[in-house]
Image (cartoon, rainbow, N blue to C red):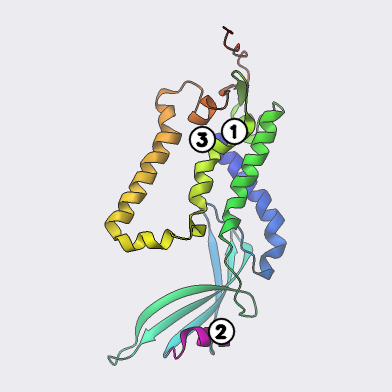
Amino acid sequence: MLALAVDSLLAWALVVVLLLSFTERGLRLPVPVIAIRGYDCTEVEQAPDWLEQALGQIGAYSLRHCATTLFGLPNGHELRVILSDTRQGALRTSRRFVVPVDAALRVVPARPWIDLLPLALLGLASALFTAFGWSTPGKRLLGLRLQPVGTPRPIRREILRLGPLLILGSAPLWPGLGAIVTWGPGAVLAAMAAIALALTWYYLWPFAHWTGQSRHDRLSGTRVIAAKAAPVPPPAGP
């Protein structure tokens, strides 16, 4: 798992380098699980026309135009909208939301697929390394390598290894995902718990009785061994 974390970090860094020049055009950088974000916000006195058209008579509000950073790198802009309710004589916040915008307060489309690019790049690169018999940087750093067991299938291995994560990462793109919220908080928590248990069984349980093979290794003809270990002979034929 540590080798996967190292390889994932390298894939994320490469994607960031490739996309960094496009952040001023509204493109956002992929956000890792652990991230350090920064915001430089200024007050906006007048709501943009598109916001007034979308909300109608919005009443009392405050707007902040924020330049965002990710690990100190520029990561586009966002408009923070805070709507207030004054019907009971006191100013109270009734709603808050954030809209991705550019430097000129124009709306930019959300691109949730951006966060999937590091995983996709990681899968392609790992399959290529495996096909040529190379160790990925993460495995090389930890002194590990893949040993073929039977006929190795690099592409199948990456689909089985990263496919569940790609499916979960693409959840914002699912058309019917919003309907789950209508089931109530209990159903949502139950679904999240089921997903967590499934991922634990799939990824972590093999380490409880480690034989050198995760589930994706068993199904793709590979085994993880120490880099200096003697090759494991292939199984004898019938």
Measured along the vertical axis of the image, is residue 232 above or below residue 169?
Answer: above
Query: Where does residue 180 sit, x and y in percent of width and height?
Result: 37, 59
Magenta-colored segment: predominant secondary structure: helix
Mark 1 neighbour class, 10 Å CA radius: few under 14, some 14 to 19, many 20 or more: some
Residue bounds of the magenta highlight: 49-58
Q: Amino acid at mark 1?
A: Arg
Q: CA distance from mark 2 to mark 3?
A: 46 Å
Q: Which residue is mark 1?
A: 156
Question: At 59% from the left edge and 64% from the top edge, which residue is drawn?
Answer: 69
Contact (Cβ within 8 Å) of mark 3 with mark 1: no
Tag shown at residue 50 = 2
The amino acid pointed to by label 2 is Trp
From this view, report whether residue 213 is shown above or below residue 47.
above
* Tag 2 near tag 1, CB within 8 Å: no
Q: Locate the C terminus by quadrant.
A: top right
Image coordinates for residue 93, horizontal then vertical, percent: 36, 81
Q: Which is closer to the viewer, label 2 or label 1?
A: 1
Q: Say left or right for 167 vs 180.
A: right
Residue 104 vs residue 46: left or right? right
Q: Secondary structure at mark 2?
A: helix
The numbered disc on residue 1 is: 3
Q: Is residue 33 visible?
A: no
Dot placed on the residue nearer the N-terminal end, 2 or 3: 3
Can residue 234 be seen from the camera position used here?
A: yes
Mark 3: give few (<14), some (14-19) or many (20+) Cα within 10 Å. Answer: few
